[in-house]
Amino acid sequence: MRHHDLIVLGAGSGAAVIEDSFADLDVALVADGPVGGTCLNAGCIPSKMLSRTAEVVEEIRDCGGYDVDAELRGMDWSRVRARVFGRLDAHRDEARSGLERSGFVTVYPGRARFTGPRRLRVELPDGPTDIEADQVVIAAGARPVIPPVVADSGVHYETSDTIMRIARPPRRLAVLGGGYIAAELAQVFASAGSDVVIVEQAETLLGSLDESLAGAYTRLAAERFELRLGRELTRLDGADSADGPVELLLDDGSRIAADVLLVAVGRTPNSDRLDLAEAGVDVHEDGRIAVDAHQRTSAEGVWALGDVCAPVQLKHVANRQARIVAHNLRHPNDLRGNDHDVIPAAVFTRPQIATVGRTERQCRDAGLDYAVGTARYADVAYGWALEDETGFCKVLAERGTGRLLGAHILGAEAPTLIQPLVLAMTVGIDARTLATAPYWIHPALTEVVENALLALDG
Ligand SMILES: Cc1cc2nc3c(=O)[nH]c(=O)nc-3n(C[C@H](O)[C@H](O)[C@H](O)COP(=O)(O)OP(=O)(O)OC[C@H]3O[C@@H](n4cnc5c(N)ncnc54)[C@H](O)[C@@H]3O)c2cc1C
Ligand SMILES: NC(=O)c1ccc[n+]([C@@H]2O[C@H](COP(=O)([O-])OP(=O)(O)OC[C@H]3O[C@@H](n4cnc5c(N)ncnc54)[C@H](O)[C@@H]3O)[C@@H](O)[C@H]2O)c1
């Protein structure tokens, strides 16, 4: 059995742990998928490159509102796909050869599971091999949940892992689930020319967000997509190949005919495929690997990071954890910790959405004495320039102290606009100081954030 100093299981955020400062170690990188993991190959980056392309389409479609006369002839999907994945696949290949050339990393391309403490069996193309190490980092990510009604049907379906590389946009796309992936990819395919129908079991889309965001987005989405809210899929019919049409039967007896089904009902940690009991690694009930503030698991010398353990499945969280693990591996007597308190998120749909901290419901449920400040894009000068009638920024702050509790933005550039609020919440700047101490550039869109903060007082 080959012994390494360090095994990293997973080539997404796991690969980021392997810094040049590890060059004095014998490192193994084990992965059953491409280097770069979900974010680079099937997640954040291709979906955002496609979202931006969709935005260009919609700007042209809406340009009459600016008294500009332009004709939209459509999105050339095969060229878009080639542009996006030409760039990303090259990046993936470069990253992989960089690791192989490094001289200190051995790449094991295969599925692994534990056979003992810090010991793994990897299924390589030419047969299994056993490896062990002094330290193991588990960065095995998550995979799409496939409900039994879909899995047991034998009918072909797509997930976010596959649909972005599809040959052509379907004429009619059915999306099961109305969360982050649905919001982003429904917009991409609608802009590419598909008719989109979304089936969501809850009464709103993006139901995990503040009710103001979920409500406003659901109303806007209803103008763009066909929505079946509060509905369950009870039966799926169709072919087992990508070419065939599909038919969804819902719990109210209604049917949906579509060319393609995208399943986007959440992602589950890959911990169940690792035989973690053999390694003495504990998991939470929801399948996440249990880690302490330093990313240590219950097993000596075994660490975890990213979607396989994180309370929220976001790349900036996985990146932060990778940096912590990289430091802690090298500095066992000076361990760094993690603070999950203020984790922002954004949905790159149309309009864009960003959120941080508590929702208003969470403030209410926690019995907090809070104030709400809201400002509309339509009431600031750059909102006029954008001809925006729907965007808003909502901030929540504790009465008396002005401690910011949460912030929620819907509208153009929301993921960028929210960053001053994230900063204030992270370092403890109160709402009044944030509103009044810095100059806010006029007439930038950030004035909508300033106004929401000022509205907390009045
Ligand atoms: C469509 C989509 C869009 C997204 N957009 C965003 C976004 O805009 N912003 C954001 O912050 N987050 C986004 N996310 C979430 C983000 O992609 C993930 O949080 C992040 O990529 C997780 O990184 P990870 O390293 O934990 O897992 P991954 O990148 O999934 O890496 C897991 C690795 O483990 C390997 N592996 C798993 N099991 C085994 C095994 N048994 N044996 C060997 N190897 C194994 C895999 O091959 C892979 O290399 C998006 C996700 C999706 C699906
Ligand atoms: N921009 C981003 O940061 C981004 C983008 C995409 C994905 N992600 C990450 O990936 C994760 C997974 O995304 P996702 O959209 O698959 O999950 P999600 O948790 O965001 O949404 C899943 C949705 O599916 C619904 N649902 C669950 N079971 C259902 C069923 N049987 N029938 C109908 N609806 C059902 C849920 O009520 C929920 O609204 C996200 O939670 C997020 O962490 C992030």
Image (cartoon, rainbow, N blue to C red):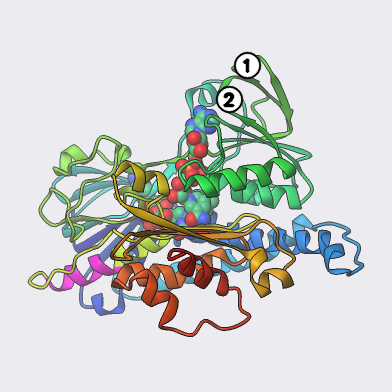
Query: Depth check: 130 or 29 in front?
Result: 29
Q: Is residue 158 left or right of residue 427?
A: right
Question: What amino acid is labelled 2 in the image?
Answer: Arg
* Residue that appears at 50% across and 44% down: 211
Q: Is residue 118 left or right of residue 272?
A: left
* Residue that appears at 79% across and 48% down: 193
Residue 137 lies, in percent from the top left, at: 24, 57
Residue 405 lies, in percent from the top left, at: 35, 58
Q: Residues within 10 Å of mark 1 (few under 14, many from 20)?
A: few
Question: What amino acid is labelled 1 in the image?
Answer: Asp
Residue 375 lies, in percent from the top left, at: 56, 63
Mark 2 residue's CB less than 8 Å from ligand 2? yes
**Residue position for label 1:** 252
**Residue position for label 2:** 231
Q: Is residue 385 left or right of residue 180?
A: right
Residue 94 belongs to the span the image colors magenta? no
Q: Where does the magenta region start and end?
A: 323-331
Mark 1, secondary structure of its residue: loop
Query: Depth check: 19 or 407 in front?
Result: 407
Find the distance from the CA under tag 2 to the CA under tag 1: 7 Å
- Mark nearer the N terminus (2 vs 1): 2
